Amino acid sequence: MPVSLHPREGALAGSAVTGRYLPVTLGVIYQIHRVAVGAGQDVLCTHTVGAGTTRLVSAGSLTACAGDYDWAARPRRTCDEYLSGGSTGPMLNILIAEGTPAVWQGQRASFGLPSNFSLVAAAVQLHQPGAHCTPLNIADGEALPYGITLSDFDGVMFPGSPLHIYDSDPCVTRQIDFARTAFASGVPVWGSCWGLQLAVVALGGSVRRNPRGRELPVARAITVTDIGRAHPLLASRPAVFDALCSHLDEIETLPPNSQVLAANEISAVQAIAIQTSGRGGFHGTQYHPEHTFAVSAALVEMRAAELVDEGLGTSPSEIAAIAADYRALDAEPMRRDLIWRYGIAREIMDPVRRTAEIGNWLRTVVASRRV
């Protein structure tokens, strides 16, 4: 519903204002919290993500939000209420740890690539409307807002990144450290592509450049393993399916307590579940359930010269034509000529089916843990 907010300057710097929230966009991303103050009075407070300030927002009272609100004591929803869309308590609160340095994202945006945060947040909200997604750029070393810890979130998600996990760059090493902290917190963790590779390395495995080359824009004939057939992460997938993807690296060695759920000829690990010391564990995919055809088009166009060098095209103009077709398909999903030309399956065409693993993780791992 529309919310009209008029921020007042009474900054409460250093205060940890937490509680029941409504997501509101005001040019930047805010966490909006509703706190009861006295009989019949409510106060809305905002905490700007990534900044150490909290502002009072008038909602019929000028009372400041004094002290800490017990976020952990907020009303909890049952698993049935999550599945039915009930509204007896706040929706899921998900931290999306952005793995792309901001300066790189600025360059990628010139090709029409949205942030990985926005792609994952859209997929989350497709399956859990109203879910609150908080961005945190761990590639740039951004810290959580004052007074907030990882245990305050229902889940942590690591999306894609153009980085390589085997590079000894601070943008990489600080993400490995953060991932280890996330696993130590016991919060459920999800990862796609880079996020999968990040989790594997953080938990003791290794990643290498794939000797079979790049997989872009579609991972073909992903085959569910015997273990994967009984796993809830792939419950709604057929035995063999295609998915949007973009990666040059692959899992080399698995960490302890890993279960490979799906594979194909290019990558022996396309989906995985890893048991950790916490209840949540890790679930992830090498492919990108959160990608769209427009994203695939931008990635193909951005890497046109590399794709020609790798033998995946004869000229940049040929690559540009493929990108144009994918953009057309994004704009007109029922273009039968393009669906036929590129062999696009329904598992990719339907947004809900395309993002199935994220929805399954939210329902069967994250929501059930909050009961």
Image: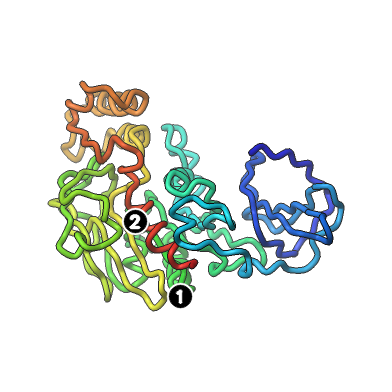
> In 3D space, how far apart are the residues under numbered discs 1 and 2 (Cα atoms)?
23 Å
Under mark 2, the amino acid is His
- How many other residues sit within 10 Å of disc 2, few (<14), some (14-19) or many (≥20)? some
Residue displayed at 59% across by 58% down: 89
Q: Which mark is residue 334?
A: none
Can residue 7 be seen in the rendering of this structure?
A: yes
Residue 253 on image: x %, y %: 22, 68
Give the mark nearest the N terminus, 1 or 2: 2
Q: Relative to 296, is 278 on the left or the right?
A: right
- How many other residues sit within 10 Å of disc 1, few (<14), some (14-19) or many (≥20)? some
Q: Which mark is residue 164?
A: 2
Q: Nearer the viewer, residue 46 or 229?
A: 229
Q: Relative to 177, is 305 on the left or the right?
A: left
Q: Relative to 364, is 19 on the left or the right?
A: right
Compared with 264, 24 (above or below) is above
Residue displayed at 39% across by 78% down: 277
Residue, disc 1: 184
